[in-house]
Structure formats: C-alpha cells, structure tokens
Image: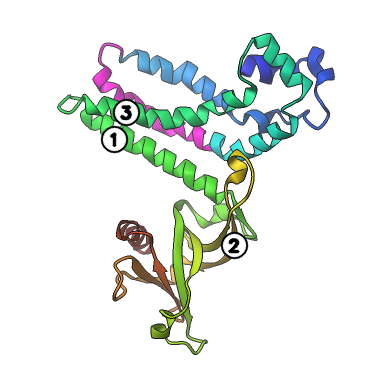
Amino acid sequence: VLQGYAAEMDNPLMAHLISPELQNKKHILFGNMEEIYHFHNRIFLRELENYIEYPELVGRCFLDQMEDFQIYEKYCQNKPRSESLWRQFSDSVFFQECQRKLDHKLSLDSYLLKPVQRITKYQLLLKEMLKYSKNCEGAEDLQEALTSILGILKAVNDSMHQIAITGYDGNLNELGKLLMQGSFNVWTDHKKGHSKVKDLARFKPMQRHLFLHEKAVLFCKKREENGEGYEKAPSYSYKHSLNMAAVGITENVKGDAKKFEIWYNAREEVYIIQAPTPEIKATWVNEIRKVLT
C-alpha cells in the first residue's frame, strides 16, 4: 500500500491521473500508516523474533513497546476522514491503475482497514496464548499485556466517539484525558425551578451521552446518522458541561441499583443518572470518585 499507492501519489508520471481535489490529500487518505509500518518493521518484529524460543515470555515484548501502540489511536481517529475521502474518489483512474499494477483483487479501502483489524486481533491472540499459559513463567506479563491492549482499544473506541461531538465551542483537549463515555437516562432538578426531586420520577428522562474527562463531564444528545461504514457512526450534539471542581456525587438513589446522582454547586443542580446496568454504574461511580479525590 505504501509503495504501490502512497508513493505513487508523488510520482510525476502518475500525476495526470490524479484529480486536483485529491492532490495533497495523501496524509488524510493514509493517515499515519507509514509510522505503523516502520514501528512493526524496525522495532516490534525484531523484538518478537527474540522470543521465538520462549513464546510464553512474549507478553514482555508487548509491555516494553506499549507506548508505541498509541500510534493506532491516531490512525483510527483519522479513519472517518480517510473513508469519506475514499468514497469521493474510489472510482478514480489513478486508484484503478495502481490496483492493476499491484495485481490486487481487493481495492485500496480493504487494505486501509488492516491496521484497525490488526489492533483488535492482538487482544484475541493474547487471550489465546493466556489460555495455554496458565502456570507458565510469563503468564502475568501476558495478562498485563492483554489488559494494556484492551485499554488501548477502549481509548480508540472512546476517542472515535469524542471526535463526533458537535457544537462544543471550547477545546476538548483542555478538559484532560477522556476517561469514560456512555449513554444514560438523565433526570434533572434545579433549585431555581419549582419541582421537587420526588416529582421527578413522573417525568420522562432525557437520553444523554456522557463524556467524563478529568476536568469536566459533558452531556450530549446522540444523533444517529445514515450512511456507510463510519458514516453510520452517531454524532453527539453538545448540551452542557459541569466542571469537575464543583461536582459532588451520591452513590445510591433509593429504589434503583442502577441510579446515582451528580450534583453541582452544593446541590443547586441535581442530575439523577440511570446506567444500563449496576456494573456500568459502579464503574462510573469509581471513575468519578477517583477524579474527585
């Protein structure tokens, strides 16, 4: 892909086949695929080869390189832009010519999906290895490697949702790390209003998608999109946010193990939040507690 497509975009002999709108868009189409390729070719593959005789210790290899695996997050974040560009130009003569020269049965988009598939495949391979390494010397490292890769997959998934937030006028990066995101039923009660919390149960809850950052929690409304692939991905229109410095939390709400309360400015605003399951509630309450302490 890098030699037969990406490099060809810079080849003067191919220039006449590339439409002007596609020129200078190489970085959008291929993202940081070259960085991923060099990481595997120069570093990760060589490391793996050191463990050919000791496969049970391969977890160490992942742990040593875990920081480099963040490059996948960058690739996945760019993927929606890449796909929308591909859809515009997929029938371009340039791509057809490259594919013909390479003698590929599949078109470029199948190959652009490979890094996304690769990062998800690693966790399956590690799970499989763990299954056969129960009492081995390297079992702990394998488990830790699996946990780390799952962490990266979660970060990739969370950031794919985060880039779909619309209408937030600040800079999301200034809110610190994105810790959690998910959909909830939300009831609100404002001191300024006249409704009492006990009346809230009658009202229909709002569906809100919450993004918990280190410095703020964002409330968004999810909108499903029609389209192909990533275009089907929902977008989230920003409604409001609470600064974590002024947030308090009540873990248990009477009568429902899935509900908890977030309140703001000494209960001036109260948000009753219902998670899909008690487990999801527990995870969120723990994360919020960590931020608050």
Q: Earlier in the sequence, mark 1 or mark 3?
A: 3
Instruction: Measure the C-alpha gap from mark 3 to mark 2.
Output: 38 Å
Which label was assigned to residue 126? 3
Amino acid type assigned to the residue bearing label 3 in the image: Leu
Is 278 drawn above or below residue 10 in the view shown? Answer: below
Task: Say whether residue 213 is visible.
Answer: no
What segment is highlighted magenta in the picture?
52-73
Is 34 part of what is drawn in magenta? no
Q: Position of residue 274 (x, y in %)?
A: 39, 66
* Viewer-proximal residue among 176 and 133: 133
Q: Earlier in the sequence, mark 3 or mark 2?
A: 3
Is 72 part of what is drawn in magenta? yes
Which label was assigned to residue 238? 2
Quadrant position of the C terminus in the picture: bottom left
Which label was assigned to residue 165? none
Q: Quadrant of residue 68?
A: top left
Q: Residues within 10 Å of mark 1 (few under 14, many from 20)?
A: some
| Residue appearing at x 52%, y 64% in the figure | 219
Label 1 SS: helix
Q: Residues within 10 Å of mark 2 (few under 14, many from 20)?
A: some
For residue 49, side relative to residue 28 (left or right): left
Label 2 SS: strand
Q: Position of residue 245 (x, y in %)?
A: 44, 68
* Viewer-proximal residue among 141 and 219: 219
User: Mark 2 and mark 3 in contact (Cβ < 8 Å)?
Assistant: no
Amino acid type assigned to the residue bearing label 1 in the image: Glu
| Residue appearing at x 70%, y 15% in the figure | 98
**Residue linked to disc 1:** 144
Q: Quadrant of residue 22?
A: top right
Amino acid type assigned to the residue bearing label 2 in the image: Tyr
Instruction: Measure the C-alpha gap from mark 1 to mark 3.
Output: 10 Å
Label 3 SS: helix
